[in-house]
Image (cartoon, grey):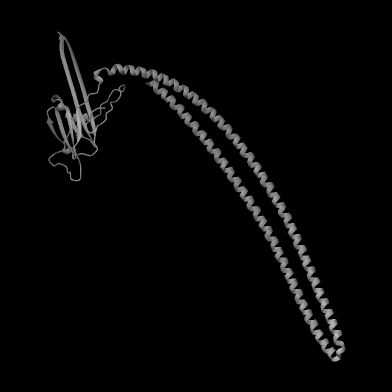
Amino acid sequence: MSKISSDYSGRDELQEQYRAQQEAKEQIRDQNEQELDRLKQSYAAQKADNADRFERSIQAEKINHYDQLRKTKRELNREQARLETDGRKIISQKTADNTKAELAAAREGESRVNEVKQKYAASEEYERNQMLNAQNEIRTNHRRSAEAILKDSETKIGKLHDDKAKALEQAQTTHAIALQQMEDHYNGLRTGAQEQYESGLKNLYQRTQDEFGQKQLLHSKMIEAYQKRAQDPFYSINRYDSDLLDIGDEYVLRVKVPDYERNQFRVQVAGQEIQLMGIRHNEEKTEIEPGRWISSNSHQTVSERYPLDHPVDGRSMTMSEQGDWLEYHLPKFNKNHRYSDAVQPKTYDPDELALVKEIEFPKSLPRPAFSKKSDSGTMA
């Protein structure tokens, strides 16, 4: 037994080492997965941040250009309004002057009216042409300024986009190299762990085969010893011939007990089961020749239990004798049942309580198996 215990201890140590290796392997795998997730999250965050900064810079450039265009348009509108105002003032002034000239011409005579009108028309046409030329020149200058601003903005936007694309490509290359290095490192660790696991498993299999062979040899010896011992009637299992019947409101237990054993036989209820207990004792002594005596002393404890599907009132249990059979009636608990006042709880002395203990069989013998039938307690 000490050798078997040491073999089991060695196998437990191997299993513990194998579990520790598996846990270390799982821990390395978790660490690698966490590092890979962290790098992925870092790359995604950096990518999102670069895209966000690029988008913000583009939007800022667009807003600045749109502000310059709006400012230029406002200046053009103001200049145009100023020119129109000046033109209207000039026209008003000229109209006033022409009116005065016409009045003077009317006083001077009809001959000067046509001359004045021609001069007025020529002057008005000249002023109008001057105003149109000034407006065209201002529009041309503003258009050229806007085109130059737009061209410069497009150049800056293209340069900024190229710089962002190069930075993104470089970050992707660096990340790919880091991922490849991590994958190579993990593959190396996994290969080493796999080789170590296969080596440990091979050693464990060989040791298991050796232990199995030794245990087979030991078990064959134990089985041979048991077969010799099982033929001895002293180690056989003895039991009472008994039946347990369920007849509705109560259970009826019938046990066949010889008269000479009834003083050492007891039936009691423990929890939700019925326990049968008995003691058999025999002592023989005889003189086979003068001065030569032989004696035999045997002591046997028999115990049997019936599990119940329904709780019973053990204090109300009654017993009657039916020839070689003892018949016990055990009422079931229900909503109408009450404890019997006439039946007092029974007390047991220490010797009787000792009968409740379960029989201890030799460890080299298998434990008996019982199966309860629907209306009897026969042994399977």
Q: Residue 171 at what x, y percent from top left?
A: 65, 44
Q: Is residue 300 above or below residue 72?
A: above
Q: Nearer the viewer, residue 35 or 131?
A: 131
Residue 142 appears in the rendering: yes
- Quarter residue 241 falls in: top left
Determine the residue positioned at 67% across, 60% down: 63
Q: Position of residue 61 (x, y in %)?
A: 69, 58
| Foreground pick, 89 / 265 | 89
Residue 125 image point, x, y percent: 82, 77
Query: Which quadrant, please, contains the N terminus?
Result: top left
**What is the quadrant of residue 237 in the picture?**
top left
Residue 350 visible in image: no
Q: Residue at x 24, y 19 (%)?
A: 234
Query: Which residue is more in the foreground, 372 or 75?
Result: 372
Residue 62 location, x and y as percent?
68, 59
Q: Quadrant of the C terminus?
A: top left
Residue at figure coordinates x 52%, y 27% from the top left = 198
Residue 114 in the image: above or below residue 138: below
In this view, 142 is above or below 272: below
Q: Is residue 314 found left or right of 156 in the rendered image?
A: left
Residue at 48% over, 31% down: 20
Name above or below for residue 37 compared with residue 100: above
User: How many callouts does the rendering have?
Assistant: 0
**Apparent side of residue 314 relative to residue 184 in the rendered image (left or right):** left
Tell me where residue 335 sits by quadrant: top left
Q: Is residue 245 left or right of residue 50?
A: left
Residue that protrudes farthest toward the top in the picture: 290
